[in-house]
Image (cartoon, rainbow, N blue to C red):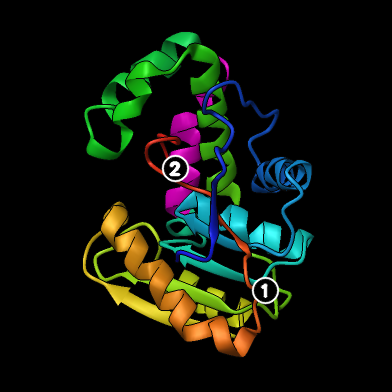
């Protein structure tokens, strides 16, 4: 990956970035505006979990050289999504509810960074969660080289969602990995990116120095 520029794009909920609704389309528009301000064009997009949903919408909004989707798609089945949206609904209006939920969630490994967030950041994160739970993948097809990374013990993104991803991106390859929804680490990210480049770089005729945009990185974004 030595010939690539890597850009870490922080999603709303980190530092001073906020969002009004938390919808995936709104977050994607925010990221696209940031890329345009940096004059980054035709990037390879990388996203994990809800970051993958953002990548899908970005691929609809702007020209991209390729997509890497890790544990991405529609979350849970419809009844579970409705239940979770009902449980998290008070967090959109109550400071006390946000603090209570954050206290419970930060005891889990993937959510430890909640401890350091202001209430404004927590509100943004909970809005994003609600937006992620409401996200439904589009029905149109995107002619973009795409690597779909699946975990064999992922209880959040199921087989139906993976099938819809395959239909959405006809130029897809699949990489199966051991683990659960939050099993990514830096060495695995390098493996995934190297797999994508070796699979697609020649056939996709990518530019010599495209930017690799990582839409989700646990050191910058606490929750997906």
Direction from residue 205 to residue 175 in the image, left or right: left
Mainly helix, strand or loop, the magenta region?
helix
Q: How far from the left and from the top, in percent, is residue 81?
A: 47, 49
| Residue 72 can be seen, yes or no | yes
**Label at residue 83:** 2
Direction from residue 20 to residue 118 in the image, left or right: left
| Residue 136 can be seen, yes or no | no
Q: Is residue 96 above or below residue 7?
A: above
Q: Most extreme residue toward the top, as rendered?
A: 96
In magenta, the rendered stretch is 79-93
Q: Is residue 81 magenta?
A: yes
Q: Residues within 10 Å of mark 1 (few under 14, many from 20)?
A: few
Mark 2 secondary-structure assignment: helix
Q: In the rendered image, which quarter is residue 33 located in?
A: top right
Cα separation, mark 2 vs mark 1, equals 45 Å
**Label at residue 207:** 1
Mark 1 secondary-structure assignment: loop
- At horizontal 38% and vertical 36% (from top left) the residue drawn is 219
Q: Toward the viewer: 83 or 189?
A: 189
């Amino acid at each position: 990956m030595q010939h690539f520029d890597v850009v870490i794009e922080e999603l709303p909920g980190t530092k001073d970035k906020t969002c009004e609704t938390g919808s995936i389309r709104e977050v994607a528009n925010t990221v696209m505006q940031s890329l345009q301000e940096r004059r980054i064009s035709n990037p390879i997009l990388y996203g994990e979990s809800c970051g993958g949903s953002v990548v899908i919408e970005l691929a609809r909004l702007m020209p991209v050289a390729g997509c890497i989707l890790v544990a991405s798609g529609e979350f849970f089945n419809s009844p579970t999504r409705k239940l979770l949206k009902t449980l998290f609904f008070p967090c959109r209006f109550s400071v006390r509810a946000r603090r209570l939920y954050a206290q419970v969630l930060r005891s889990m490994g993937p959510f430890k960074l909640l401890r350091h967030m202001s209430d404004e950041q927590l509100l943004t994160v909970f809005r994003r969660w609600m937006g992620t739970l409401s996200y439904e993948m589009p029905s149109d097809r995107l002619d973009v080289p795409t690597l779909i990374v699946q975990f064999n013990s992922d209880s959040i993104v199921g087989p139906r969602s993976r099938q819809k991803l395959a239909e959405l991106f006809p130029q897809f390859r699949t990489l199966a990995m051991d683990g659960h929804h939050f099993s990514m680490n830096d060495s695995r990210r390098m493996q995934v990116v190297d797999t994508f480049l070796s699979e697609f770089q020649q056939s996709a005729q990518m530019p010599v120095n495209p930017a690799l945009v990582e839409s989700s990185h646990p050191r910058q974004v606490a929750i997906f």
